[in-house]
Amino acid sequence: MVDHLANTEINSQRIAAVENCFGASGQPLAVPGRVLLGEGILTKECRKKPKPRIFFLFNDILVYGSIVINKRKYNSQHIIPLEDVTLETLPDTLQMKNRWMIKTSKKSFVVSAASLTERKEWISHLEECIRHLLTKTGRQPSTEHAAPWIPDKATDICMRCTQTKFSTLTRRHHCRKCGFVVCADCSRQRFLMPRLSPKPLRVCNLCYRQLLAEQKKEAEADRRQPEPICSAIPGYEPSSGDDSDKSDDDKTDQWPADTEFYTSEVSWSSFHS
């Protein structure tokens, strides 16, 4: 499929259309050899609530963003290198069906498809692209993944001390290491995790102690041997949290509030051939 579509006019037009929908807020997507293989709407489990997101699968990257006007305007573009992606199928919940997790070293999150068939298609195409990339680069599959953030509504109390009850005055916070929902007292520490961000990030007290212990262990090992040279993976938005979650409810979202994006009666995705 990639060989068939690469360097064709139809592929160039499809990529240009995606760039136009993101406008000046998005990054250029047209590079030699890049092919747009499929696109569709998936429901992403965000910090506040599940929200529809537009996804574009290329042969080397996965691009997604917020929907302002479907097929016309998107924003909040995120780009994920496929060679850093690992997939994990998840069971259904009462609220979300046909779920799976997209895991990377910098960001992990849960999405759901409109039907079981669509989930199988997405996962099949993603895994095929990942296998091709890893074979081409000679890299091993990624084994280190960022923890997905647990949604706010999953708990009314701090998941560490189990004493603090959240309210309008008592805010929820997320540990960037484990993804737990925690109170301020249980997450006063910050720790530098270069894999996620160039700035120190909020972590819970338990993870802070574990990270300090790991840091001490690594420092002792470094004193005994030269520091290895690591090649960096192309960067994109840090943390495993919601992709901005800047109250998308205030944006011009064209989707009815009661829309069920996992209903099996409507197909939301298409793959090119």
Image: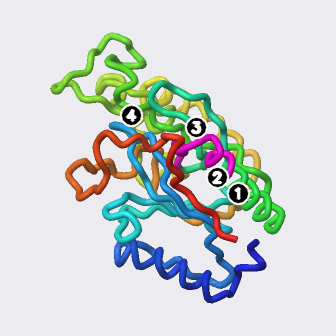
Residue contact between numbered discs 2 and 1, judged by CB atoms under 8 Å: yes
| Place of residue 148 in the rendered image (x, y in percent of width and height, measured from the top left) | 51, 38
* Sooner in the amino-acid sequence: mark 3 or mark 4: 3
Q: Earlier in the sequence, mark 2 or mark 4?
A: 2
Residue 174, numbered circle = 4
Where 190 falls versus 243 (above or below)?
above
Is 152 drawn above or below residue 146 in the view shown?
above
> Residue at horizontal 65%, vertical 75%?
35
C-alpha distance separating marks 2 and 4: 29 Å
Q: CA distance from mark 2 to mark 1?
A: 5 Å
Give amino acid for label 2: Trp
In the image, which is nearer the foreground, mark 2 or mark 4? 2
Q: CA distance from mark 2 to mark 3?
A: 11 Å
Q: Residue at x 61, y 81 (%)?
A: 11
Of 10 and 224, nearer the camera is: 10
Q: Which residues are magenta?
A: 107-121
Residue toward you, 235 or 254: 254
Q: Read off the residue under disc 3.
A: 98
The reply to whether the magenta stretch includes residue 109 is yes
Residue 122 circle label:
2
Under tag 1, what secondary structure? helix
Instruction: Decide whether residue 113 is among the magenta residues.
Output: yes
Question: Is mark 3 in CB contact (under 8 Å) with mark 1?
Answer: no
The x, y position of residue 70, in whole percent, is 37, 63
As drawn, the label of residue 125 is: 1
